Image (spheres, rainbow, N blue to C red):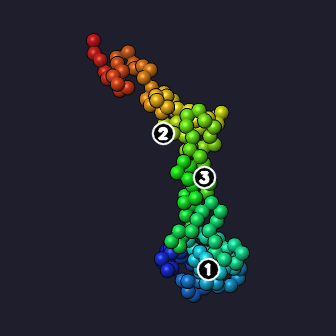
Amino acid sequence: MNNIGGYCRKLSYTDPCDSASMVYANGSCVQITKPGDECIHDLQCLGGSICTDSYCKCPQSTAYCDGYCIGSVLCNLNEIFLNNRCFKRVILNETCFISQQCPNNAICDYAARCTCLTGMAVVNGQCQPSPINYCDDIEVMVGYHLNLTYY
């Protein structure tokens, strides 16, 4: 990796440019640039930016922060960031698209609803270990933990 003005850039052995601050794009060597600088090709943009309207700009669903394009900055506190998108966090039995939207120990099921994982039960609106006795014949449930009993 090359460090170009605080940015890491992958080394390329097929790049005919003779400077670490240049990149080969569309048949010529062009200067590497940071977000906000002029550009002619995406390859020259650093910090997660892309060349849009002749300037290195942060892609949609990201924001500029200290020279880098950061994705999660645009999500609200009640959202999660995944695959360059913000998804609303949901509670149990609400509609979901991905399991990451659901509370701890829950998944987004086939009906697109947040439900508790197998072995979990709803306790005060949260998925907790199920109080149902799943013990074998020589075990007894004690506070949701299995203990061996001997007769």
Q: Position of residue 138 (x, y in %)?
A: 34, 17
Q: CA distance from mark 3 to mark 1?
A: 27 Å
Q: Is residue 107 above or below residue 144?
A: below
Asked where in the image residue 108 lies, by quadrant, the reply is: top right
Q: Earlier in the sequence, mark 3 or mark 1?
A: 1
Q: Is residue 82 above or below residue 28?
A: above
Nearer-the-camera pick, 46 or 135: 46
| Secondary structure under the numbered disc 1 in the rendered image | loop
Amino acid type, label 2: Asn
Amino acid type, label 1: Asp
Circles 3, 1 touching at the beta carbon (< 8 Å): no
Q: Is residue 96 above or below residue 141?
A: below
Q: Position of residue 130 (x, y in %)?
A: 45, 26
Residue at the location (59% across, 32% down)? 93
Residue wearing tag 3: 86
Q: Which mark is residue 140?
A: none
Residue wearing tag 2: 104
Q: CA distance from mark 2 to mark 3?
A: 18 Å
Q: Nearer the viewer, mark 2 or mark 3?
A: 3
Residue wearing tag 1: 37
> Do we see residue 10 in this rendering?
no
Residue density around tag 1, few if under 14, some if 14–19, many if 20 or more, within 10 Å: some
The C terminus lies in quadrant: top left
Q: Position of residue 23 (x, y in %)?
A: 61, 80
Nearer-the-camera pick, 133 or 79: 79
Amino acid type, label 3: Cys
